Amino acid sequence: MSNYHIKHLEEYYQVYRKSVREPENFWEEIAEEHFMWQKKWDNVLSWDFSKPEVKWFEGAQLNITENCIDRHLATRGEKTAILFEPNDPSETAEHITYNQLHERVNRFANVLKSQGIKKGDRVCIYLPMIPELAISVLACARIGAIHSVVFAGFSATALSTRINDSDCKIVITSDGSYRGAKTIDLKGIVDEALESCDGVKTVLVAKRINSDIHMKSGRDKWLQPLLENASAACKAEVMNAEDPLFILYTSGSTGKPKGMVHSTAGYMVHTAYTFKNVFQYRENDVFWCTADIGWITGHSYIVYGPLANGATTVMFEGVPSYPDFGRFWQIIEKHKVNQFYTAPTAIRALAKQGVELVENHDLSSLKVLGSVGEPINEEAWHWYNDNIGKKKSPIVDTWWQTETGGIMITPIPFVTPTKPTYATLPFIGIQPALMDENGKELKGNQVDGRLCIKFPWPSMARTIWGNHQRYKDTYFSAYENKYFTGDGALRDEVGYYRITGRVDDVIIVSGHNLGTAPIEDAINEHPAVIESAIVGFPHDVKGSALYGYVTLKDTGESRDQNNLRKEINQIITEHIGPIAKLDKIQFTSGLPKTRSGKIMRRILRKIAHKDTGNLGDTSTLLNPEVVQDIMDNVL
Ligand code: 6R9
């Protein structure tokens, strides 16, 4: 029990020190006491960042689904494992108990086997946020097949690239999906994608919207009858600790998407341990992460982390704006959600709607609020803290990446005093380092540099599927013997970390290093502003100057734009200094975003450079229409 559930700050420091001094002993104890192994490891850790090669719990055998499902059956069989909240609020929510989850995963696993899928095969899952998504993920893990979930908002081209990159044999999809008032023809997208995927011989189709779709004979099969006829018992495949559990694609700044490969034992241990502590999860709490399982956040904190702790995890099919912008708050009230984990982009969108939609709902069940995906600006942080947490629920600003598998820098609620816009302290076992331009580690506090991690942690990705060299070049070549995150960060006077944004977003103006996030923070405080993005553009004297794209709350308003520009620069001057003033401010109807809500600065940079001949890979763009609008009005 010791060390598994941190309850006060002194304990954090104590356990943290142990995790750094004796990492192997530390992780061994956690692994030993809290998980179910078919065979224990011979060696806790071996590593060499120059190759790079990292192995945790080598020699151990396990199946992650036995840890996420089977071992809970004796004590939690009738407890809700997955609480499914449909898109349409009038449709009944579904409570899937651990017993039912066990049966449904086993049936699904047997269906996969009946289609010839075996250990090591890659399975592409292209499903909306319906129970079959979580169940198919677990079914793959049950039989040792490697799942590759592709977010069901990606286009046919993006889907086929991902299917081909990892040679998936089978695709699991649905007839269609609901998204607010709209339906989306998912099966049509799969059909189009498969025109260029020769390796896929089978498509399993779940019924969700009852649309009239074309089933290609010999290839496409309805899932439902197969599940009904399958046996409800499926022995868990024996997996080695380092066997791949899944591939998840993340976009690189150049080239094709990178298929990050995660292993079994380390990933399980780290996601379970972070889940327990970062959300201070207690038995009978209801946990809700609003991400899609198509992203790493959903993998780790909707499926694996919560289920490994025997938790109740909410899966929401819909969108925050349907039937109105009060939907999130309505769901929290309805299911008495205790921990709520969402992204700054969602918080900003909801904050724009006014507080009446919040005040109509009883949010008193909330204990912990989380944020992930991008730096949370100060205004959004306060809105979240004041209106949702009522200043009582700590906000955990969790920094991590697809590549890291689980949370890395974060407060522990009720343990670490929070500070707006700071991810605060490294999680247990995580050893961050800040580096200067010359590759030297910056020691001590009050320093600002590039964020690296200098010691392995259990859930780190092990490679890029089919391209180990790219893994090495991208993450292990910038600094010797360190994993480079691609982010910049500062460490304040007490050792708290603040992520300042991707370092490729750092702009050097007249010799001063400026992170985009603090400037955007400042701009976003102007009452007329919704969102902003800063990029650099070439300047005769300064080297680079700053170009700001700013979205206003009221676009119809005929305000004096030049006056507004002055006010924005005034705020920046107040917050950061005149050095950070913008040379150009373009008012926009929106900002180009990826489907996970990240601003695509690469495109904005090209537009500011008037280099729009080739915008690069735009397949992950959510709102292509704003790009044309921005190009038409470039300054
Ligand atoms: C989990 C996830 C990773 C990148 C990461 C960083 C940014 C994520 C953040 C954050 C500041 C936070 N990021 N969390 N920046 N504060 N709390 O989002 O994974 O989609 O791979 O993105 O997101 O820039 O490097 P992924």
Image: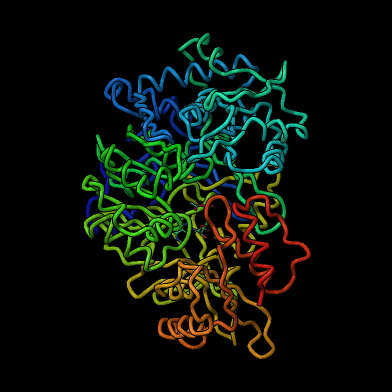
**How far from the left and from the top, in percent, is residue 308?**
38, 34
Looking at the image, the residue that sits furthest to the bottom is: 541
Q: Colour scheme of this structure image?
A: rainbow
Evaluate whether residue 14 shows in this view. no
Quarter of the rendering occupied by the N terminus: top left
Give the residue displayed 48% in from the left and 35% down from the top.
Answer: 129
Quarter of the rendering occupied by the C terminus: bottom right
Query: Left or right: 349 with respect to 280?
Result: right
Give the residue displayed 63% in from the left and 50% down from the top.
Answer: 620
Query: Left or right: 246 with respect to 188?
Result: left
Evaluate whether residue 250 shows in this view. yes
Q: Is residue 288 above or below residue 12?
A: above
Query: Left or right: 262 with respect to 157?
Result: left
Query: Left or right: 415 with respect to 527?
Result: left
Instruction: Give 620 or 432, whichever is nearer the viewer.
Output: 620
Give the residue displayed 41% in from the left and 20% down from the top.
Answer: 102
**How far from the left and from the top, in percent, is residue 361?**
25, 47
